[in-house]
Amino acid sequence: GAGVSQSPRYKVAKRGQDVALRCDPISGHVSLFWYQQALGQGPEFLTYFQNEAQLDKSGLPSDRFFAERPEGSVSTLKIQRTQQEDSAVYLCASSLRVRVDEQYFGPGTRLTVT
Amino acid sequence: DAKTTQPNSMESNEEEPVHLPCNHSTISGTDYIHWYRQLPSQGPEYVIHGLTSNVNNRMASLAIAEDRKSSTLILHRATLRDAAVYYCILRDVEYGNKLVFGAGTILRVKS
């Protein structure tokens, strides 16, 4: 079946621009996660949704980062006024239920801020 | 989340078994041990997880020490496609939603 998809796969933004990254989780998956992965490092947690409710946003690095999942399926991660340090791969993952279920990751969106 | 310690890198020959170690001396009774791997230019992929007993699946085996302070991921016959970064992660059974990744172990497989 279809896995987690993300779009765009690559995004180049000029510093100060706003960007929106989309995640389509596996159909029926309750939990959705966003992670940020800098070059050469492991992914770092950004935020977590259970259906449409954002239950944990402790990893969002600043108030320029905003995520939503209004109907409990597709999610969008928005970054306002992008900075060079926002350059990274943004990974989305979904899992069927909560807690210790395995997470299925998308291929990521590589964001480059120039 | 409790921390894990893994070697930075390991090397293996193709078709040979690989044992990837992970230390987690501060593990709590409710922490599951999860392994994910990340192939180049891809998102992480679930490999296996366990709580106390050794586990086997089609991808690998997980051997957990009796005191649970360490574990070993075993790839029975490494292939070139197993070259990846392997992450050992602890997740609390009650509160463990997010994955907390460390630096992982870079596995290189030689033909």
Image: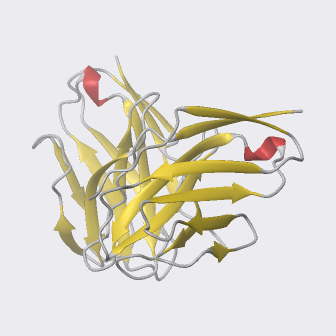
- Name the residue at 39% across, 55% down: B24
Q: Is residue A67 above or below residue B107?
A: below
Q: Position of residue B25 (x, y in %)?
A: 35, 55
- Name the residue at 29% across, 58% down: B26
In this view, the residue farthest toward the front is B66
* Quadrant including the C terminus of chain B: top right
Which quadrant of the view contains residue B5? top left
Q: In this view, does B95 lie above or below A78?
A: below
In this view, the residue farthest toward the top is A114
Q: Say whether residue B68 is visible.
A: yes
- What kind of colouring is applied to the model shown? secondary structure
Q: In this view, does B13 lie above or below B94?
A: above
Is B39 displayed left or right of B52 in the figure? Answer: right
Q: Where is residue A48 in the image (x, y as percent from the top left)?
A: 27, 64
Which quadrant of the view contains residue A112? top left
Residue closest to the eye, A26 or B102: B102
- Name the residue at 49% across, 46% down: A108
**How many discs mark residues in the rendered view?**
0
Q: Say whether residue B45 is visible.
A: no
Is B102 displayed left or right of B47 in the figure? Answer: left
Is B98 displayed left or right of A27 in the figure? Answer: left
* Quadrant including the N terminus of chain B: bottom left
- Name the residue at 25% across, 76% down: A52
Q: Where is residue A106 in the image (x, y as percent from the top left)?
A: 53, 55
Q: Where is residue B7 in the image (x, y as percent from the top left)?
A: 52, 37
